Image (cartoon, grey):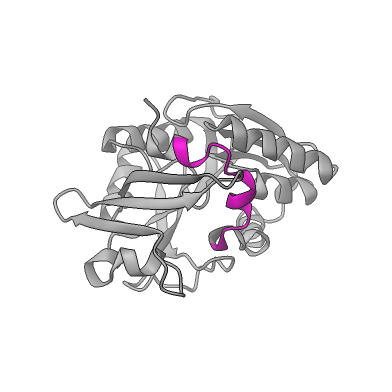
Amino acid sequence: MKQWYEELFTNYCNTYDNEVYTTGTQGEVDFIEKEINYDKAKKVLDIGCGTGRHSIELAKRGYKVLGFDLSEDQLSKAVEKAKANNVEVHFERKDARNFDFNGEYDLGIMICEGAFSLMETDEMNFSILRNAFNSIKPGGKLIFTTLNGLFPLFHSVKDFINNADGSERTKNNTFDLMTFRDHSSFDTVDDSGTAKHLECNERYYVPSEITWLLKSIGFQTIEIFGAKLGAFNRNDKLTTEDFEMLIIAAK
């Protein structure tokens, strides 16, 4: 039986690329470039790359990138987009819970919950961070975003995700204070116009928890900021208003 995230990303490529939360690619890559000092020799691993929007933009700017994802449909779209943009990106189908590039990469990225926090158990999410650590060189970085556990303590996740016109995409949201998981029903339409109904289960994290997880794996320094769509910035202090947080972990 497929998990909800596997169902969601089947035949969903064009719809995904037109979602509001995928519109910030240019600004996000601007930030990523700055974090590696615009060094074109740096090798980048895009974990849970989806349709390749960050991988392709980095390749356009001269970086060597490998992107991988669990979804065959998303990867097919990524390959198609890379060809259309006349850039070379190596895409592979891999499960983020089971990979190890043995310290080959200078930078790992997981933007827009590119696997992490979507998994059904905390152990699976932990394995993704551990695998990323093992794939990054000493002195390298992991840059990723994840759901900010401070947000649902003060706000309605349902209201945040639903459309501005009042129409519902998510309903029956139940945020569990013991597990920091939000269980919800999500309705959307795939690229063929077929309606999808999904029972979702997403994990939110608080800053102290993320810091402890990353340090226990072996990362030396962890910095956490608010994650503004398309405008990542070290000056953005994380607050309860941020739906996501931006984490920069150095090995």
Whether 240 is drawn above or below 8: the answer is below
Say if the magenta span includes residue 8: yes
22 with respect to 117 (left or right): right
Which image quarter: residue 55? top right
Which image quarter: residue 152? bottom left
Whether 77 is drawn above or below 180: the answer is above
Please tell me which residue lies in front, 190 or 240: 190
Q: Where residue 128 sits: x, y (%)?
A: 41, 35
State the residue at coordinates (56%, 63%): 20
Which image quarter: residue 2? top left
208 with respect to 65 (left or right): left
Say if the magenta span includes residue 245: no
Q: Which quadrant of the figure contains the N terminus?
A: top left
Q: Where residue 149 sits: x, y (%)?
A: 28, 59
State the residue at coordinates (55%, 33%): 71
Residue 94 can be seen in this image: yes
Q: Which residues are magenta?
A: 7-20
Whether 170 is drawn above or below 63: the answer is below
Please tell me which residue lies in front, 136 or 86: 86
Image label count: 0
State the residue at coordinates (54%, 66%): 229
Q: Residue furthest right?
A: 86
Q: Where residue 30 sits: x, y (%)?
A: 67, 61
Q: Where residue 176 sits: x, y (%)?
A: 18, 53
